[in-house]
Amino acid sequence: MKRATLILLMTVIAAFVLLPMLWTLSTSLKPLSEVNVHPPRWTSPQMSIQPYIDMFFFLPFATYTANSLIVATSATILTLVIGSLAAFAFARFHFAGKDLFLLVFLLSQMLPGASVIVPLFQLLTDAGLYDTLLGLTLTHASVLLPFAIWLLYGFFCGIPREVEEAALIDGCSRLAALRKVLLPLALPGLGATALFSFLGSWNEFFFALILTSSDTTRTVPVGIGLFVGEYTDIWNQMSAAAMLFSLPPLLVFLAMRKTFVKGLVAGSIK
């Protein structure tokens, strides 16, 4: 009885979660004339993939997708490199202000993006990085880095010091021990951090909206908002863009799901 109740509850929750996605998929296949009919219908005799084709002619969606992939991938790599080095230093060395730094990293996650956008905008403008993929990548990495440091810090603290000391005795330097011994042991944590970082950068809208102004640098979240016009909203093409936008994160998650689950379980134990 308990098992049947649990299965029913999970089915209801799954249906509740999937319902918006299914409706978006249905809308993405309808002509615009069928989108706003009342009462709304799940299907239409005129359903086709034409909105997906028209979407690429209405906006340079291929460019937006390439920009999102470049920014998200670059920000993830940069976050992992700097975050792993910083987390290793916090986990293995004792220095003045260590706890304060960790507290500041934690508190920085509570600040809304609007509180830092003005100085950030001025900084990127003065550096000549406004409306560039490099400027947006650095922004995303700086936003993701405190969370990555906190997450990896727990994993490095969970690795026994004796493992690192054995590598040092064998002639490894600190960095060599980190690269050859500690990072492979922290692979589940790196996988979970990479996934969170990629999704965080891929879905980010606010900074991408403010810090880009041309089609050559806009990302997909900003591009989807451009389907909202002054006199009409192109809901079918917007839904088609949203469906395509959800594919890369889904593929990344499926490819890394085992590492992600191991990272979450290990992190919860620590």
Image: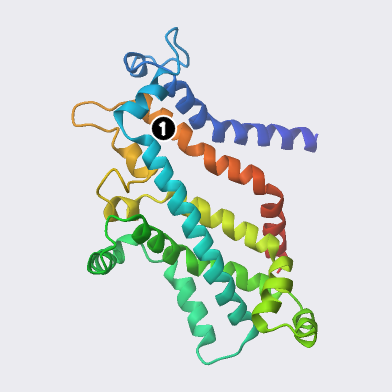
In the rendering, at what x and y percent does residue 205 appear?
Answer: 36, 49
Q: Residue furthest left?
A: 230
Q: Which residue does the numbered mark 1 point to in the structure image? A: 241
Q: Residue furthest bottom?
A: 96
Looking at the figure, which quarter contains the C terminus?
bottom right
Residue 99 position (above or below residue 64): below
Q: Residue furthest front?
A: 171
Residue 242 position (above or below residue 86): above
Q: Name the residue rendered at 36%, 29% in the picture.
A: 56
In the rendering, at what x and y percent does residue 128 appear?
Answer: 25, 64
Q: Quadrant of residue 229?
A: top left
Q: How many marks?
A: 1
Looking at the figure, which quarter contains the N terminus?
top right
Q: Is 70 placed left or right of 31 in the picture?
A: right
Indicate the secondary structure of the residue bearing disc 1.
helix
Q: Amino acid at mark 1?
A: Ala
Q: Name the residue rendered at 30%, 61% in the picture.
A: 114
Q: Is 119 placed left or right of 263 in the picture?
A: left
Q: Name the residue rendered at 52%, 78% in the picture.
A: 102
Q: Is 130 placed left or right of 163 in the picture?
A: left
Q: Name the residue rendered at 49%, 78% in the picture.
A: 103
Circle 1 Cα neighbour tier, 10 Å, few/some/many (<14 / 14–19 / ≥20):
many
In the rendering, at what x and y percent does residue 178 appear?
Answer: 67, 75
Q: Quadrant of residue 255?
A: top right
Q: Which of the pair 183/109 is nearer the observer?
A: 183
Residue 81 position (above or below residue 228): below
In the rendering, at what x and y percent does residue 261 appear?
Answer: 69, 53
Q: Quadrant of residue 174?
A: bottom right
Q: Residue furthest top?
A: 45
Residue 98 position (above or below residue 249): below
